[in-house]
């Protein structure tokens, strides 16, 4: 079993990552922590609670609210053109019955990792602010995390916010820098692979049409949210479909052999003007150690089968 803490800025693709994690039989989600990013942290927390309830998961999943802004900078505001005014494509889900726990995201991470040394896989699909704060509170957790899977970065491919920077790193580069320097074993699932896992209209129809008993509301949500997401990518990139960024990170935590990786030393640029937020790989191997397994190839058909079969179940 993969015991997971998932950190999200829910977000349309985040919501699909949450559903994928909760519906995968051999993943146990020990908690979900939230952060600003695609939307503000209060909205991201609300969306997360709603998506958990939509999933029909049969165990308790604590939600801990985290950072409202980057470590040192101002937040640039919600990404409404991709994720809608409420983060989930303007879909209206029922008022959540549950609420967030009293602990902050960072406190929750510190406590859970200390209680379960070498047991927990962390999957971060938003800004890395909560983990940077957790590491500041207790640096010893770095050696107790089993693995950290990050959706973020663009190593050999262009960025999606600037020519070189990807949104989750660009959104708080100082936090990402601290995480990459921490010694936690990292698998980086960046745009190098997530841009290759694209779903389109046929997949949306399959997810939406003839839902399994009990999955009707989730199926309707997926149909509606993907419609918004595809439309946003269509306006931006001219194709009606979308890359499954965040679900791929969950998938790699569940099935590491979905991707081929190369071990490299990754540094985060925090000072450059043009290069701010870049994930720089030491391909020349001037640093004698590595800190990250970077995914460069992905078995997209196998991932898409897993994604669709699991979300239909
Ligand atoms: C990342 O940015 C966010 O918009 C998505 O949820 C994903 O985590 C892709 O760059
Ligand atoms: Ca995200």
Image (cartoon, rainbow, N blue to C red):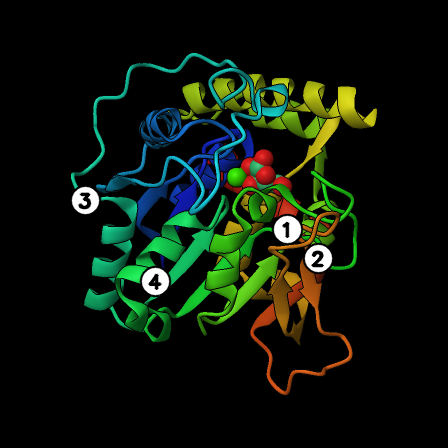
CA separation in Å, label 4 and label 3: 16 Å
Say which of 139 and 290 sits in front.
139
Q: Are marks 4 and 3 in contact (CB under 8 Å)?
A: no
**Looking at the image, is mark 4 or mark 3 earlier in the sequence?**
3
The answer to whether 144 is drawn above or below residue 274 in the figure is: below
x and y percent of residue 148 in the render?
46, 62
Q: Is residue 57 above or below residue 129?
A: above
Q: Which residue is mark 4?
A: 135
Distance from Cα at disc 4 to Cα at disc 1: 20 Å
Q: Quadrant of ligand 1?
A: top right
Give the image location of residue 116, x and y in percent. Answer: 24, 67
Along the viewing direction, whichever of 247 and 33 lies nearer the viewer: 33
Residue hosting label 1: 277
Q: Is mark 4 within 8 Å of ligand 2?
A: no
Q: Nearer the viewer, residue 226 or 74?
A: 74
Disc 3 vs disc 1: which is toward the camera?
A: 1
Q: Give the mark, 3 or 2, whose residue is nearer the N terminus.
A: 3
Q: Residue furthest left?
A: 102
Q: Provide the residue designation for mark 2.
A: 298
Residue at label 3?
Answer: 103
Sequence-wise, the earlier of marks 1 and 2 is: 1
Cβ of mark 1 under 8 A from ligand 1: no
């Amino acid at each position: 079993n993969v015991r997971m803490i998932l950190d999200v800025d829910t977000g349309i693709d985040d919501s699909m990552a949450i559903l994928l994690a909760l519906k995968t039989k051999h993943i146990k989600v020990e908690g979900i922590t939230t952060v600003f990013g695609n939307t503000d942290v209060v909205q991201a927390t609300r969306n997360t609670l709603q998506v958990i309830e939509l999933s029909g998961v049969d165990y308790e999943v604590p939600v801990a609210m985290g950072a409202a802004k980057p470590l040192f900078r101002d937040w640039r505001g919600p990404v409404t053109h991709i994720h809608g005014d409420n983060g989930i494509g303007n879909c209206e889900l029922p008022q959540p019955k549950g609420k967030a726990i009293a602990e902050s995201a960072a406190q929750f991470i510190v406590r859970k990792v200390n209680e379960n040394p070498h047991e927990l896989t962390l999957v971060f699909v938003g800004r890395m602010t909560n983990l940077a704060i957790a590491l500041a509170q207790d640096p010893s957790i770095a050696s107790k995390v089993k693995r950290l899977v990050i959706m973020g970065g663009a190593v050999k491919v262009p960025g999606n916010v600037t020519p070189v920077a990807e949104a989750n790193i660009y959104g708080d580069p100082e936090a990402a820098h601290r995480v990459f320097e921490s010694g936690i074993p990292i698998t980086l699932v960046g745009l190098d692979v997530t841009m290759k896992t694209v779903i389109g209209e046929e997949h949306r129809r399959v997810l939406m049409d003839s839902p399994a008993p009990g999955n009707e509301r989730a199926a309707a949500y997926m149909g509606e949210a993907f419609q918004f997401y595809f439309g946003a990518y269509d306006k931006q990139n001219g194709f009606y479909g979308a890359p499954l960024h965040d679900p791929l990170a969950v998938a790699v935590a569940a099935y590491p052999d979905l991707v081929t990786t190369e071990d490299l030393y990754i540094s985060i640029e925090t000072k450059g003007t043009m290069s701010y937020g870049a994930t720089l790989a030491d391909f020349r191997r001037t640093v004698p150690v590595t800190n990250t397994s970077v995914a460069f190839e992905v078995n997209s058909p196998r991932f898409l089968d897993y994604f669709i079969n699991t979300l239909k179940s």
